[in-house]
Amino acid sequence: MGYKELRFAVKVGEIQQEPAELIVVNLFEGLSRPGGATAAVDRAMAGRISSVLAAGDFTGKLNETLVLYPVGDVAAQRVLLVGLGKQDKFSLDIVRQVAAGVAKRVRELGVESYATIVHGAGSGGFDLQDAVQALVEGTMLGLYRFTQYKTDLEPREKHDVGKVTLMALEQEQTAIIERGITFGQAIASSACLARDLVNEPANVATPAMLADLARSMAGEHGLDCDVLDRQQMEALGMGALLSVAQGGYQPPYFIIVEHNKAGQGLPTLVLVGKGITFDSGGLDLKPADSMERMKDDMAGGAAVLATMRAVALLDLPLHVVGLVPATENMPGREANRPLDIVKAMNGKTIEIVNTDAEGRLILADTLTYAARFQPAAVVDLATLTGAVVIALGEGAAGLMTPDDDLARRLAAAGDVSGERVWRLPLFEEYDEQIKSDVADVKNVGGRPAGSITGAMFLKKFIGDYPWAHLDIAGMAWIDNGNAYVHKGPTGFGVRLLVQFLRGWLER
Ligand code: BES
Ligand code: MN
Ligand code: ZN
């Protein structure tokens, strides 16, 4: 997969004395005089930063940058001044954005390595480890690009940053900064893996490829991995999942990845990710413009696999299970027909009114399977409905759960990680919409509350465990983005899930 190794180092000392190719200092918007490390650099270079401010040539607007070539006692070749925006709007997410803006500017300059102060740790007032983690995340996610299939890049376009040095004021800070780096790197490199998997086209990222990736990832990071094939799924009675797979040529796989499988007494958390490697809609074929994006319909599965990688790298003291049902949804000759009835693993019969509501079919059997782990909680991530894009756009994932405690935990993890969720209700009345005349349930509930009826359907297949559903259809792939989440695949869910799991440890 395509991200270049980016190294982070810690150094104790004053940034103006650092003999780097480039050093990074910052400034809040509207300040007439710099403070902290920026002031120290300003003094060492005879007030050059103050003169720029006095001239009004730099205002400190978010991600405004200015390259200065120092005179006097600054050891670096270049000084990059970056704007932090308004002080009262400052947050860990701004740290991510600033770090991303800086890294991309440095890359543009053709520079290989730089030293930076930790934005947010000084006058920002954030916990040092958290600020470092955010800085590392922003840097790596901002530098992310998918160039796998570009065969004609110029050397200049291939250039990437190789090393970032974080400056510590005193020796005692280095261990804290190193912890922040460890978390930031594990999380961001895994989120980049999720982006890669979604970027890969459906003729490459097949169910077999996802299964291979899970196996090799497990081997590399000490996870357990088991992959069920069609026969094994048949033996388990996964009739809903297999009915979707029937329409495609690519064989389906049910991927199971486990961290701390033998972990006696550790709480078990199960993560489920929708793994439709391509959603054509099936016989209820999607129109061309809606089908275009549908290689991203395994984004939930990609996020779950990538989260398992991060969990292994961080060796979280939890038993974590990742489940990814992987199949295409294609209109092949054995494909589901509208009004076909299938039997799910839990014995319930489903009338398939629309073959394009396939995500809930494959998740139904996966949620039933999840019960065997006797989990403390199950969280599923799925690009399940277009309706959630209408409801929440690119602002938040839809969160649906009957469990207030899980809702609170996921919302908190969303705020900290910057991958926000917003809860929608699961009132019993919505059940009316998915009643079938001929089977136990039907797989569509009409246009009203489309995301909620999707979740109401899933709820019929869960076991006796707390469960939350995240509809990430609006977040997995975006058209707008910011400095560190570019348009296209976002890797959404990795930062959120790792933070959710860390929160579980603080129970
Ligand atoms: N994968 C789609 C949902 C989707 C839509 C994701 C747009 C990202 C962007 C899902 O399988 C689907 O087709 N859902 C249908 C459900 C309907 C038939 C009840 C939808 O939302 O239209
Ligand atoms: Mn669909
Ligand atoms: Zn789908």
Image (cartoon, rainbow, N blue to C red):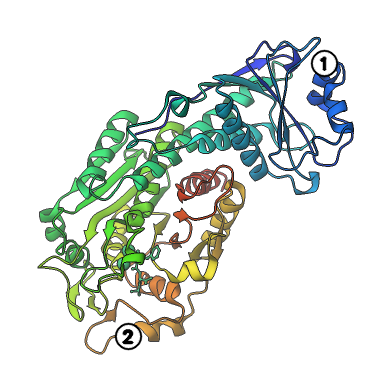
Residue at the image position 49 percent from the left and 37 percent from the top: 188
Rendering coords of residue 135 (x, y %): 61, 34
The answer to whether 148 is drawn above or below residue 503 in the figure is: above
Q: Are marks 1 and 2 in contact (CB under 8 Å)?
A: no
Secondary structure of the residue carrying tag 2 is loop
Residue identifier under label 2: 435
Dot 1, how many residues are within 10 Å of its Cα: few (below 14), some (14-19), or many (20+)?
A: some
Which quadrant of the figure contains the N terminus? top left
The answer to whether 153 is drawn above or below residue 506 in the figure is: above
Q: How many marks?
A: 2
- Relative depth, front residue between 337 and 283: 283
Residue at the image position 40 percent from the left and 62 percent from the top: 465
Residue identifier under label 1: 45
* Quadrant location, ligand no. 1: bottom left
Q: Earlier in the sequence, mark 1 or mark 2?
A: 1
| Residue type (three-letter) at the residue carrying disc 2 | Lys
Residue at the image position 20 percent from the left and 46 percent from the top: 208
Rendering coords of residue 18 (x, y %): 69, 12
Residue 401 visible somewhere in the drawing: no
Residue at the image position 59 percent from the left and 27 percent from the top: 106
Dot 2, how many residues are within 10 Å of its Cα: few (below 14), some (14-19), or many (20+)?
A: some
Q: Quadrant of residue 173?
A: top right
| Real-space Cα separation, disc 1 to disc 2, in angstroms | 73 Å
The answer as to whether callout 1 falls within 8 Å of ligand 1 is: no
Image side of residue 323 versus residue 159, left or right: left
